[in-house]
Image: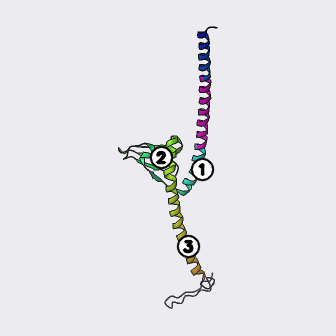
Amino acid sequence: MSKDDKVNEDNLAAAVKAMEDLVDEAVQVYELDKEKINVIDDLYNSLKIITTYMSFSVDLHPDLLGLPEHTRVILTSALDILIIRPNFKSEQKRFDQLSLDETTNVLRYAIPVIISMARADRTIKNKKISFLREGTKKLKRLPSSSAEDMTVTDSAIHVEKVES
């Protein structure tokens, strides 16, 4: 075996090894893409339950999706992304159709905003419930009596009991 034959065999072996490495990397990338799809589906379904219940929509900064500055972007409670371009044309995307970077950007921005909205909503509801609870407590201080026992004390009104 000549020196050139040995070099050729080494080159061929290196090329075959490189192809095997390429296949291994491609398989790993494929598996990661499948996992990404499953994770995003799970995230989408779980988050949609929360956002639909709360009914909040969030204005997003267009930079989060790589859009021009004067574009309006809204994340709806159904997790749709509504994009209104400066020329007033609009398009709609589902949250789970975004790229991995866009998904990450939107979540980093929207989750704290939704938490803030939920806290404000909780505070308002808590105040209203406290008001109603206090009103109920005040009304319960009335002596308990049935409707028939209550009499009208205004002498200008004459009430007769109607017998059937």
**Amino acid at the residue labelled 1:** Ser
Locate residue 97, reporting x and y percent: 52, 41
Locate residue 11, reporting x and y percent: 59, 17
**Amino acid at the residue labelled 2:** Ile
Is residue 63 something that shows in the picture? Answer: yes
Locate residue 164, reporting x and y percent: 63, 81
Residue located beneath label 3 in the image: 130
Locate residue 25, reporting x and y percent: 60, 30
> At 58% from the left edge and 77% from the top edge, which residue is drawn?
136
Element under label 2? strand
Residue located beneath label 1 in the image: 46
Quadrant containing the N terminus is top right
Mark count: 3
Find out whether residue 28 is within the magenta segment: yes
**Amino acid at the residue labelled 3:** Ser
Residue located beneath label 2 in the image: 81
Q: Residues within 10 Å of mark 1 (few under 14, many from 20)?
A: few
Q: Residues within 10 Å of mark 2 (few under 14, many from 20)?
A: many
Element under label 3? helix
Highlighted range, magenta: 18-39
**Cα separation between marks 3 and 1:** 31 Å
Find out whether residue 86 is within the magenta segment: no
